[in-house]
Amino acid sequence: MNARLAVANTEEEAILLSNLLQHSQTTFQEAWIGRYFDGNIWTTVDGIAVADSGYEGWADGEPNRLRRTRADNSIEFEACGSLHWNMQHNDDYCTSTHPFICEFYNSPCTNL
Ligand SMILES: [Ca+2]
Ligand SMILES: [Ca+2]
């Protein structure tokens, strides 16, 4: 049973995933999906560059790699990918709280 955070490989899949979030009972408008900044490029949890994954779908101005200083004075950058209910992707701080959407083969699963 191999499941992992969902990766939207097509616009149709991004619509399907964002519809899951939009029609759920959660008040969150973004959910974690399977893309992250590996220090050089944005990649998927499958190890494929987001640019080669079939669908990028970043929101205007994203990924913007915002940075902030933590309480211990260390720096944190936005490096984890989320999907907004409007089917656009964002980068957010990996320590942020969002629901997640994963996929099992071609079927979505979620904690929404
Ligand atoms: Ca997929
Ligand atoms: Ca961002």
Image (cartoon, grey):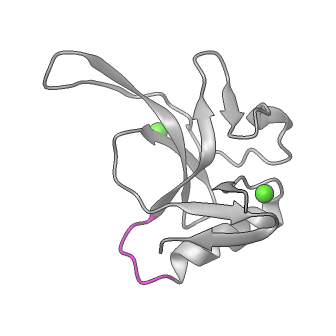
| SS assignment for the magenta stretch, majority | loop
Q: Residue furthest left?
A: 71
Magenta span includes 36 = no
Up the image or down, 67 lies above or below 16; here it is above
Q: Residue at 73% x, 57% y: name it.
A: 2
Residue 29: which quarter of the image? bottom left
Left or right: 62 as drawn, with respect to 54: left
Locate residue 23, reporting x and y percent. 53, 83
Position of residue 39 relative to residue 29, above or below, is above
Percent across and percent down for residue 108 are 69, 70
Whole-percent x, y for residue 6 in the image: 67, 57
> Where in the image, quadrant-wise, is ligand 1 located?
bottom right
For image coordinates 47% across by 27% down, the residue present is: 65
The outermost residue toward the front is: 1
Q: Residue 74: x, y in percent?
A: 24, 16
Position of residue 82 in the picture relative to residue 3 (left or right): left
Q: Is residue 58 above or below residue 109?
A: above
In-image side of 61 versus 66 (left or right): right
Magenta residues span 24-29
Q: Is residue 25 magenta-colored?
A: yes
Count of numbered tags: 0
Could you say which is closer to the camera, residue 21 or residue 2? 2
Of 54 and 32, which appears nearest the observer?
32
Pick the residue in front: 86 or 80.
80
**The N terminus: image quadrant:** bottom right
**Displayed quadrant of residue 68:** top left
Query: Residue visible at 83% across and 57% down?
Result: 10
